[in-house]
Image: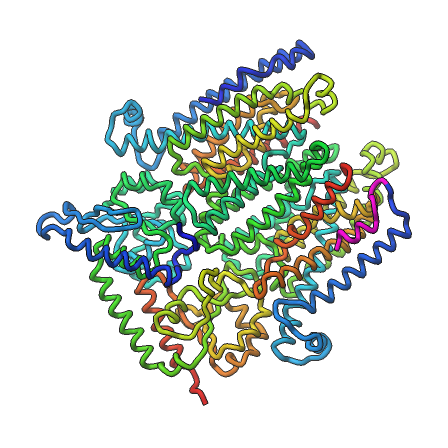
Amino acid sequence: MTALALRQDGPGTSAVPGPRRRLLGLAVALALLAVLLVLSVMIGSTSIAPSVVWDALFHSSSGIDEFAIRDYRLPRTIVGLVVGVALGLSGALIQALTRNPLADPGILGVHAGASFAVTVAVGLLGVRDVQGYMWFAFAGALIVTLMVLALGSTRQGSSPVVLVLAGVCIGAVLGGAREALQLTNPEAFDAMRYWNAGSVVGRPLDVVWPILPFFAVALVLAFAASGPLNAMALGDELAAAQGVQLVRTRALSVLALTLLAGGATAIAGPIGFVGLMVPHVARWIVGPDQRWIFAYSILLAPSLLLVSDILGRIVMRPSEIPVGIVTAFVGAPVLIALARRKKASGL
Amino acid sequence: MSADSPRVDFGHRVLVLRRRRFAVRLDRRSVIVCAVLAAAVACMAVLALMTGSYHLSAAQVVSALAGGESELIHAIVVEWRLPRVAAAVVFGAALGVSGAVFQSLLRNPLADPGIIGFSQGSYTGALIVILVVNGTYLQLVGGALLGGMATAVAVYMLAYRRGVQGFRLIIVGIGVSALLGSLNTWLMIKADLDQAMAAAAWGAGSLYGVSWSQVLVGGACVLVFLLLAGMLSRPLRQMELGDDAAASQGIRVSPVRLGLIVVGVALTATVTAASGPIAFISLVAPQIGRRLARTAGITLAPAAFVGALVCLAADYLAQHVAPTPLPVGIVTVVLGGGYLGYLLFTEARRRL
Amino acid sequence: MTTTPLRRRGAALVAALLSTTLVLTACGSDGDDADDTGDPTAQTRTVQADNGTIEVPADPQRVATIGNTTLPFIDLGGEPIGVTEESATNVARLPEDQQATYASAKILATSADEVDLEELATLKPDLILVQIPDAEFEAIEKQLELIAPTVFFGLDAEWKALADGIADAGNVADALSQQKKEFGDKVAKIQETYGEVIDGTSFVDISRGDFNDPGTFYIADIGCSEIARDEVGLDLPEAAEGADPLAYESLSFEQIGELSKYEVITYPVDAEGQPTEPFVPVVESNTWKALDAVKSGRALGVFCPGNNSYGAAIRYLDSLDSALATLPAEE
C-alpha cells in the first residue's frame, strides 16, 4: 500500500510537492488507515459473517463469535493503531534528532532495556502475565534510554555518533546479560521467545489505557519540537543563530520519543523496523519538513502495522504469525526497492 | 601466534608521507600498544591453561604439555584446554581485523560484516540445519557459511547499481537483515524448546569443545586472509579519504572495495564456521584499538590484538568466573560493550 | 539422515522402528554377561546404542546423565551422581523422593549445553547416559568416551525405547519391567471401564504454555495426550503424517469457538486439580465459558506430570481415569 501511495507522489526530495498535494496525500493516507481499521475487525483466523460483526459491535448479543469480535479483534485493532502511531512518531523523532538514517528507536536502548527488564521479571521474579511485566518493560525502556543519554552526552550537548555508539554499548551489555539469564533459565527463555517477536494479540485494553496519557503528552511535545528540529537539520550553528534552543529541543524530543517507544514496546514487545522504515518513506514522499514527516509517519506506521497483522492472521490459517515478524517481510522489500530507486537520500 | 603477522606490514609508510613528526610519534605508540597487548594475551593464555574445574597443579600442566602425565590429564591440558586457548586468540584477531576493514571501508563506526547481512544470514542457515534438517555438525557449519555468503552476495547485488555506494549498501543491508531476523525469530518460535535453546546457544557463539583440527584448519584460513588484509591495508587507508581522492592516487576503487569486502566476510565466516557467530568483537575491537593507539583512523594491527585479548579474556570469564559456563559470545558482548562504554565516557569527559 | 525435529515428545511412528532395534539389543546384551560372582564393577557387558556397541560395567555404580536421560533414569530408581539441569517446572512435578534424588546430584550444566567436562571427569563416573541433539553429541563424543563408557540416544528415540535403553545400560531393568506391567494394567483398566466413551466420543486436548504469546493457545497432540491417543485409544486429533505437530501452531483465542466441534475437551491442571498458571487466561475468557462442552461439564482437567517415562505416564493415566469418571452420562 505504501508503495502505491509513493508512486503517485513521484520523484521525492528533489521535487517537494506543494502544500495542496501534501494535504491530499495526507487525506489518502487517512482513508487508507480507516479502511485498514475496518478490515482488521472484519478479517481474522476464523470467518465470521459481517452481520455478526455488526451485532457484536453495536448490540449486546452473547454468542461465541460476538465474544471473539469484542474480546479479541477489536482490542488488537486498537492496540495495533496505538502502537503503530507511537512507533512511527518515535522513529521520525529519532531520525530527526540524530540526523542518522540508521537510527531506530531501538538504537537508544529502548528494546534492550525493555527486554532485559521483562526477562528479569519473568525469569527471576516469576511475573507471568502481560499486565504484570508491561510496567517492567516501560520502566526498563525509560531507565536505559536515560542511561544512554547520560553516557552519550557531553556538556555541549550530544553528538549523534556518540549517542548511537552509547546506545549500542549499553544495548549490547544488557543484551548479553539477558541472554545469559535466558540460557541458564530455560523457562524464562521459553517465555521470552514470543515476547521478542512483538505482537498485538492478547493485550487486553486495560493494559493500553494507562499508557495513553503518556502518548498524549509525547504527541504534544513532538509537534512542539518539530519547528526547531527543522532548523537544526541545517546544522547546530545555523539553528542557534536562528534562536533555536538546542538543549531544550533535544531534551523535549528525547523525552517524547522515549515515552512513545517505551510505551509501544511495553504493550507489544519489541517491534523493529516500523520506526526505522516509515519515516524514510514519509521523507521520500513529503520532503524534509519535520511537521509533515511527523504527520505522515503517524498515519503510515499504524497502516503498516495493521496490514502486517491482517496478513499474519490469514497467510497461515488457522495459526497466526506475530505482527513483529510480518512487518519486516512487508516493509523490507519496499525499503530496498526505494533505496535502489532513489539517489542517496541523506538527511 | 598468527596474530602478530599483520603487524609487520603497515603503519609507518602511509603516515610518514604526510606529517613526519606527528606520524613517528603515533607509530611508536602503536607499536608499544601492540607489544603490551601481545604480552597481555600471553599472560592470559598461561592463566587459561592453568585453570579448570579439574584441579591440576602448575607442575602437572607443564609436564602434561611436555608429554607426561596420565592419558586423561594429558587430554585435558593438550586436547581440551590448549586448542580452546589457541582458538580464542586466532579467532579473536580475525574478528578484530574483519571489523576494522568494514568500519574503515564504510567510514561508519557501526559497520561490521553484519551490515551486509552476513551474521543474520549465517544464523538463518544454521537454524534451518538445526531445526528443520536436524543435521550433523558439519552440515551446520555448511549451512551457516552458505547462508552467510548467499546473503552477503544478495545484499551486494541488490545494492549494486552502476557501482556500489556505501549508503545504499547500508540501507539494503538493514532491510535484508531485518527480513532474515524476522525469519529467524519465526523459526525459533516454531521450534521445540530444547532445539530452540540449542540453536540459541550456537547463535551466541561458543568455543566449547573446539578441537585441534578446527583450530588448525581455521587458523590457516585466518592467516591467509590476514595477510591479504595486510596487503590491502594501504589502499584501504587511502580510500578513507574518499573514493575520488583514492582514485586520483591511482587506486582502482571498485575492485579494491570488493576485495576488502570479501576478505572481511571471509575472516568472519571462518570464525563462524568453527565456533558460531561470536558477536561484537568485530564491532568494538577496532574502536578500542583506535582509542588505545590514538591513531587518526581505524588501523588493523591494534584491532587484531584487541580482538585476540577480548576473545581470550571473555572465554576465560565465560568458563571459569561466570556462575555457570556460558557461550563466549555472551561475554564478549558484555565485556566489549562495557569497555567501549567506558572509553566513550572518559572521552566525553576529556572533551569538557 | 533424520529429517523431523523430534525431541522428548517424539512421534510414535518413527519410534516403532527404533524400538525394534533396541529390543534386539536388549536380547543380545544378556548373553554377554559373565558369571555373577566377584566384584560387580569389574564385570562388563555390551549394549547397543546410537553411537555403536558400547562396553559398559555390568552393574554401574556412578552414573552421569546428560540431556533427556536424567528424568527417565531417576524414574527407574537410578541415582545419578551428575546431571544436566532440568527446568524448575519439570522438577516440581516429580514425586518427592525423585526430587531428592535429583537434588543430591551434581549439576554439570544448565540445560544440556556446555556440559562441564572437567567437572564430569572429576566425578569419575563409570557410565554416562546421553540424549542430546546429534550435532552437540558429535562435538563432545571423544571427550566423554575418554572419561567413561558413553551410551548415546538420538533425539528421535521415542520414550519407550529410551526407557528400554536406559534400563539396559544402567542395569535397572527390574524396575522397568515392574513399571511396564503397571502401565499395561492401567491402560487395560481404562479401556475396559470407558470402552463406550473411547469408541463413540471425539476428544481434543488443548494447552497453553509460558512460551505462548498472550492470547494464544495450542491443540496438544504431543505430550501426555499422545499416550491417551496411541495407548488408550481416545479419539484425539493428530497432525498429518510428515507435518509438524499441531502443537507447534499457536492459535489465537479467536479459535476457541472452533473447539465446539469436539464433544469433550481436556485441558492441563496441576496436581491439585487447578488449571495450570499459563492456562488460566483461557479458562477466564468469555469464549471458553460460552462453549457447550464447558457449560455441560464435558471439559476435563487432566494432570500431566511428564511423558518421558513410565512412572510419569502412569500418574497421567491415573489422572485421566478420575477425570473420565466425572463425565456426565450421554442422554
Identify the residue at image location x=73%, y=64%: A37
The quadrant the C terminus of chain C occupies is bottom left
Lateral position of residue C77 relative to residue A145, left or right: left
Q: Is residue C281 above or below residue B346?
A: below
- Give percent across and percent down for residue A26: 83, 55
Look at the image and give the residue range highlighted in magenta. Answer: A1-14
Please identify the quarter of the rendering in which residue C124 is found. top left
Residue C92 spot, x, y in % from top left: 38, 61
Give whichever of B55, A30 is nearer the camera.
A30
In-image side of C219 versus A36 (left or right): left
Q: Is residue C304 above or below residue B295?
A: below
Q: Position of residue B231 (x, y in %)?
A: 57, 19
Residue A11 can be seen in this image: yes
Toward the viewer: C18 or A320?
Answer: C18
Nearest to the observer: residue B134 or residue B113: B134
* Camera-side residue of A302 and B292: A302
x, y (%) of residue C150?
28, 46
State the residue lying farthest toward the top: B20
Residue A151 seen anywhere in this rendered image of the structure = no
Query: Would you place residue A64 above or below residue B289 in this image?
Result: below
Magenta residue check for B312:
no
Judged left or right of residue A135, residue A225 is: right
Is residue A5 in the magenta section? yes
Residue at 40% from the left image edge and 67% from the top image edge: C226
- Report how many numbered discs are placed on residues in the image: 0
**Residue pictured at 21% horizontal, 47% vertical:** C56
**Residue at coordinates 45% horizontally, 38% vertically from top-left?**
B206
Q: Residue B349 is drawn in which quadrant?
A: top right
